[in-house]
Amino acid sequence: MDQLVAICIDGVIYSSWLFTSAIGLTLIYGVMKILNITHGSFYALGAYTAASVTGTLLARGMEPLLSYLVLLGSAAAVALIVAPFLERGLLRFMYVKDEVVIMLITYACFLMLEDAIKLIWGVDPYFVAEPYGLLDSFEIGSLTYPNYNLLLIGIAAMSGLGLVYVLNRTRVGRLLLAVIHDPEISRAMGVNVDRFYLVTFSFGAFLAAMAGAFTAPTLSVVPAMGVDIIVLSFAVVVIGGLGSLQGAAVGAVIVGLVRSVSIHLAPELELFVIYFVMALVLAVRPRGLFSIAEARKI
Amino acid sequence: MSAQKEPSRPDESSLPRADSSVTTVLTIAGAVLLLSLAAPQWAKFLLTIALAKGLVVLGLLPQMRTGLVSFGQALYYCLGAYAAGLAAKWFAVSDLILMIFIGGSLAAVLALVVGVLLSRYRSIFYGLLSLALSMILYGLLVKTEALGSTDGFNVAPFTLFGYRPEQDSVRNVMLVVVTTIATVSALVIHRHLRTPLGRMTTAIRDNEIRLEYMGASARRVIYVNYVIGAVLAGIGGAIVAAAVGHIDPEMAYWTMSGEFVFMAILAGTASVLAPFLGAAIFSAIHSFAFDVSPNTWQMILGASLLLVIVFLPDGLWSLFRRAERS
């Protein structure tokens, strides 16, 4: 019984973490048709910035509860500085190219950002555990969980619901849907498509950086974290169907539960099952669970 | 004498310059071999690895000509390496040629099955599914204690036709074998691309539906190319396993596949020699930049990839074409 509860709770926590990490990827793909490998870099940048800034401020005697705001602020700073630079400076000239080529361009940027991170922060791990331990913990049966996990779940829910609200209930969201549907006609109708691309890319980067920033307190921040997160996010997003928000949520829940089941029952299969599920879904539904069929063009 | 020759063989002159390509490949292979046999040991080793990886990239070439980029070539690279390594470990196979054969055939068997599924996929979904498949292997190997999990295991020194090369000639033997395999594979692929099936490869990229209207099966072409790519990747992996003497699961990680795609983009797909050029340049950047500043070599790689994609979309090989034309 305890094990079942543990599997469910771990699964939910892990799913929400996955969702936050992957949602930016699906957003950027949905709007701009870019499979953004730099997503992993933004995640790592967010984690590093958060860990170093929070660590420094706490050492100078900052009120510990403020550290959550600092985490959020670091993510925003990363997104506001790096993302527009990348989108305006490079990617916007590449939109005419093939999807696969754009993906390779983001791969090149990913390689460069990996080393930029090493140059700025070095290769030693960073720790900032205070925000994690600051909140109390809750108990279910004989199991104890830190409340920080509730914060992660809250962030995932907020970002998912927030995006759905903005997309479906606001003027900007409707315009964005129009841009997704047909950028050319939207442009002809007077929509500033370039600005939508810039904002979407930056916001997607912010979501990645935020996932990194709020993950930083739970582990040691090391150079390889961007490399690992990117394939995991791919799995989540591809299972749900690229560009679909509901898809990303469902993908996150599937991967989260599958992984937590395997960690509790067969730990040696942990990585295997994630990608096995991804391959299985792709084999049955080539474009993911929540994809729309696309007509072949001559 | 010459006047008595048959008056006209119109086909001969209008044939594509297949023969000149063959001699070019053979000349370059011979030159590389002669030059490198005189080179220092470390250079021989680097060249062996570059040629082995070049084989994998050569396998990517037909796929990339169809416009499909496999982000999971590491699956077969790693499979070939582990097949060769396990043959050596469990069945005491030490013959280099046999190890390479085992690596290539196991890759072929898997690709014959998986290819049925994968040949239905296009654009990034092709890349993503192949990525998922290679990550499955990675996930399995990382957690398999019997195979050394993340550390992998060592591969015993190889023999060739029952003869165990001396310590100082191992590299030479390896180099000769690799160069031979690379040359033969390059010629085979060159030939393959000139068969009707091979010529459909570029037709698929141009317009797949029109190709099918003419009665050809795009799936079949993609399937064949995929299996060829897998075999070459398996062979490359087996060679690396024997040359390095150690294998680990990193060989199946997505960054490895990324490396192969990198090499392919760098040199382009215009010639069967281009993959080897790409692999050589990559290895050169990798080892020299890594020596100079270990923390910026990826930056150099990324920057060169970016420059090539933006300014030479057909890869470095297109420079030769330009020189030829002017």
Image (cartoon, rainbow, N blue to C red):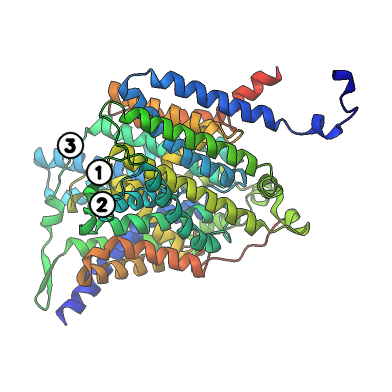
Residue type beneath disc 1: Ala
In the visual, does B25 lie left or right of A116? Answer: right
Q: Could you classify mark 2 by the number of other residues whose Cα lies within 10 Å: few (under 14), some (14-19), or many (20 or more)?
A: some
Residue type beneath disc 3: Asp
**Residue B145, quarter of picture:** bottom left
In the visual, does A296 lie left or right of B145? Answer: right
| Label 1 element class | loop
Disc 3 vs disc 1: which is toward the camera? 1
In this view, B107 is above or below A58: below
| Circles 3 and 2: CB atoms closer than 8 Å | no
In this view, B122 is above or below A246: above
Q: Position of residue B257 (x, y in %)?
A: 42, 45
| Circles 2 and 1: CB atoms closer than 8 Å | yes
Which quarter shows the N terminus of chain A? bottom left
Q: Which mark is residue A124?
A: 3
Q: Nearer the viewer, residue A209 or A33?
A: A33
In this view, B140 is above or below A6: above
Give me the residue at 32% from left, 40% from top: B159
Give me the residue at 53% from left, 39% from top: B185
Q: Could you classify mark 1 by the number of other residues whose Cα lies within 10 Å: few (under 14), some (14-19), or many (20 or more)?
A: some
| Label 3 element class | loop
- Residue at the spot of label 1: B156
**Residue A165, quarter of picture:** bottom left
Distance of label 3 from label 2 (alpha carbons): 37 Å
Q: Position of residue A109 (x, y in %)?
A: 42, 36
| Label 2 element class | helix
Q: Of the residues under marks 2 and 1, which one precedes in the sequence?
A: 2
Residue type beneath disc 2: Lys
- Residue at the spot of label 2: B89
